[in-house]
Image (cartoon, rainbow, N blue to C red):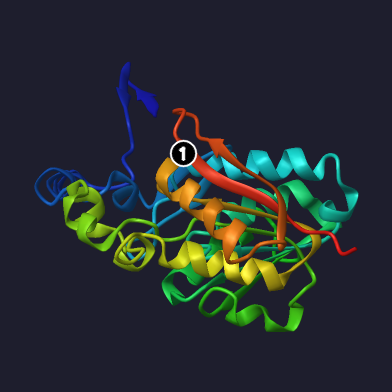
């Protein structure tokens, strides 16, 4: 903004015609505002986003808070190796990397090369290149070299049942990547996979936090851990999000006896 001859003028980042076309995309195509402006404000971060990458949600911010609470009382976990599976924009990896500082490390994985490119930009923006390593691949596949040595695993996986995708608001089902939304017939495919992987990838005492679609999925996962993975985990709990919805499953790898 500047003042010349007593008149105020504002310099726009885009021309009026470009702004009009952006507005049409928002109104007519229901394109998410975050894709139009190229960023999303998340926690105290400004993260780059683009089509092909899931827009980080406010409720997912709580995972970072949960990690902060645990590592504040556990030096072993603070100084350990963490994994963010299906990192997308890198939101969780960046948030956790800033908490760990130079005392810990994070490996962030994603199958989508577009997501890894965006995540790389975001971790560079916050100077975390020496703390966060990006690896391309599906879930635990890029982590075979650190099996059994991971201090913490976090993930916001696809958990929407396949038949429900088309019923999501237009901004989501038309523009956000189906790969990051579709969790299979019941929405549980990847959540079960994450639980199975955590049983072998976490070191004793290691922490996992997974985001789910709500209470039903959380309770289903607890039953799965108590039956199919009995004895693998302890102190498993359900944590509600900011809206009071039972959203997160948190637990620890059973200590060896």
Give the quarter of the figure containing the C terminus.
Answer: bottom right
Task: Give the image location of residue 38, x and y in percent.
Answer: 38, 52
| Residue at the (50%, 65%) spot, across then down | 192
Give the quarter of the figure containing the N terminus.
Answer: top left
Q: Is residue 125 visible?
A: no
| Residue at the (59%, 81%) spot, across then down | 141
In the image, is residue 107 above or below residue 3? below
| Residue at the (43%, 50%) spot, across then down | 217
Residue closest to the far left: 28
Residue closest to the far front: 227
Q: Residue beneath label 1, please? A: 58
Task: Give the image location of residue 65, x and y in percent.
Answer: 65, 38
Q: What kind of element bears circle 1?
A: helix
- Closer to us: 178 or 15: 178
Residue closest to the far top: 6
> Residue 245, located in which quarter of the rendered image?
top left
Numbered label tally:
1
Task: Give the image location of residue 164, x and y in percent.
Answer: 22, 55
In the image, is residue 211 above or below residue 229? above
Left or right relative to 20: residue 53: right
């Amino acid at each position: 903004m500047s003042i010349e001859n007593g008149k105020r003028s504002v310099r726009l980042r885009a021309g009026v015609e470009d702004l009009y076309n952006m507005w049409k995309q928002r109104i007519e195509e229901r394109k998410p505002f975050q894709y139009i402006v190229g960023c999303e404000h998340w926690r105290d971060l400004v993260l780059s986003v683009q089509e092909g990458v899931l827009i980080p949600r406010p409720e997912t911010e709580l995972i970072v808070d949960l990690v902060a609470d645990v590592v504040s009382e556990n030096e072993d976990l603070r100084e350990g190796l963490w994994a963010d599976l299906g990192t997308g924009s890198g939101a969780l990896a960046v948030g956790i990397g800033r908490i760990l500082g130079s005392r810990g490390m994070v490996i962030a994985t994603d199958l989508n090369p577009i997501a890894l490119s965006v995540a790389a930009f975001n971790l560079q923006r916050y100077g975390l290149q020496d703390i966060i390593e990006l690896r391309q691949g599906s879930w635990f596949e890029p982590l075979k070299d650190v099996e059994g040595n991971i201090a913490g695993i976090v993930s916001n996986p696809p958990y929407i049942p396949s038949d429900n995708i088309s019923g999501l608001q237009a901004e989501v089902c038309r523009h956000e990547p189906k790969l990051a939304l579709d969790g299979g017939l019941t929405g549980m495919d990847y959540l079960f996979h994450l639980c199975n992987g955590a049983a072998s990838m976490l070191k004793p005492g290691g922490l996992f936090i997974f985001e789910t679609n709500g209470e039903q999925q959380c309770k289903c996962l607890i039953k799965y851990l108590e039956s199919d993975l009995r004895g693998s985990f302890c102190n498993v709990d359900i944590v509600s999000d900011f809206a009071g919805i039972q959203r997160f499953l948190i637990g620890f790898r059973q200590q060896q006896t």
